[in-house]
Amino acid sequence: MLKTLFLNPPSYNGYDGGAGSRYQCTREVKSFWYPTWLAQLAALVEGSRLVDAPARGLTVDDILPMAKEYEFLVLYTSTPSFPNDVKIAEAFKNKNPKLIIGFCGAHVAVNPDHSILASDAIDFVAGNEFDFTIKEIAEGNSLENIDGLVYKKNGVPIHNKPRAIIEDMDSLPWVTKIYKDNLVTTDYYNGYMLHPYMSFYTGRGCKSHCSFCLWPQTISGHKYRTRSVKNITAEITWARDNFPEIKEFFFDDDTLTDNIEHVEALAKEIGKLGIVWSCNAKANVPYETLKIMKDNGLRLLLVGYESGNQNILVNIKKGIRIDVAKQFTRDCHNLGILIHGTFIVGLPGETSETIEETIKYAKELNPQTIQVSLPAAYPGTLLYNQAIENGWLVADEDLVGNDGVQHSVLSYPHLSSNEIFKAVDDFYKRFYFRPKKMVTLFFEMCSDWEVMKRRSREGIEFFKFLFGRENAI
């Protein structure tokens, strides 16, 4: 094996876009996700090292001395971070001209020619599911003989045969052992999970076809492939025994509840382990399944409601009905399952009236916590293509600013990007600054000193977030 370094590069302050994150920007409260995709690569390459610079607070100067210690460097990149990541690759190449440098991630998978030509420091970019592509390079194979990558020859991009999608998910080694050797669990937290938490994947792909969602459209596809229940529970058991500090496990599959039979079987086995867990879910899980999950340790579901207007849900191919989502939410409340609800303001079909409709909808649903985002029109998604075709993209506007704040990149004849941007602040304020919600959160804080300290910090960060957005308008 080549001596290999897997790097989540330094970025702007508060960057939470590790390889497990959906949106690479600064959130309303400081948060970091585990770099699961990179950890999966490290698990495949014996003797490699994983460095998560943003989570550790490392700068370029901190990591640059590593350049001469390795033969092979892999960076996980994204559309917002790509220009910054190229500069880091160039700095490493200048320190060690013999270093092989490759990029992986959705951005380079859908823009391979532009990416490979962006700098002489980049030797290759990897396509969709790049796990075994990277492994074969680390084993010393020639680039021209490896499926799933694009490299340069005489300044011209050369496209190799696409990499076949992974069908046997149990063929991938556990990422938690890489976490143990390379990461610090207390570096990872967000506004709705117990701290410290741990996240990893039990499967890849998503049956849904949401027009804005990046991963299924670029990397993992719409076929949901899962590891076996035996394999998953074995890893959870190992992680439980080796990370006694972990208070909650989060299964970061796009939609763990896509396969009802599988999730019920998994929940019943997890229930025997005595752990607390959470996952992503679609707002259509039957009551009986929810009860099985709750009875076996489920604490919280992360649910993408997106909009309270049915026509917008149809426009984005969400595949969910408002009445079904309401019943699902009532079921969760009745069972004592907490919900972190996510919403997006400014999707196709949005108007001032539908924004008001969604705010009222969120208040009616009343999840424990919410996240309100602007549409992230990533290259490779249907939303991006629609924006280009219809002239919705704001010219010369990046998805994320240098400060990490997400920009409003879509504008409609009847609804400006500035109006969409301001609606996010209004949404947050009207949801959280309700007397009943504030009392609920206050009593939650009073129940646990650690929660009190954490919520106090998050409260300060939240107000700074809102104030910063107001100044950005």
Image (cartoon, rainbow, N blue to C red):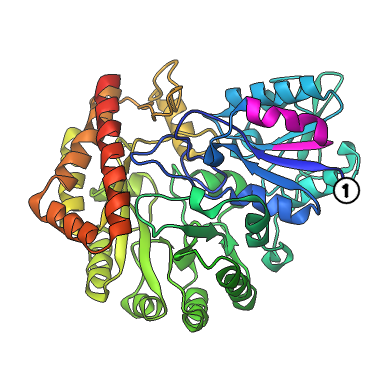
Q: Secondary structure at mark 1?
A: loop
**Residue 296 placement (x, y as % from top left):** 42, 79
- Is residue 287 visible in the rendered structure shown here? yes
Q: Is residue 69 magenta?
A: yes
Magenta highlight range: 61-74
- 173, 332: nearer the viewer: 173
Q: Amino acid at mark 1?
A: Met
Q: Is residue 248 above or below residue 421?
A: below
Which residue position holds label 1? 1
Residue furthest out toward the top: 396
Q: What residue do we see at 42% from left, 57% from top?
A: 195
In the image, what residue occupies the spot 40% across and 26% down? 390
Residue at left 21%, top 46%? 358
Quarter of the C terminus within the rendering: top left
**317 left or right of 241 in image:** left
Where 276 falls versus 34 (above or below)?
Answer: below
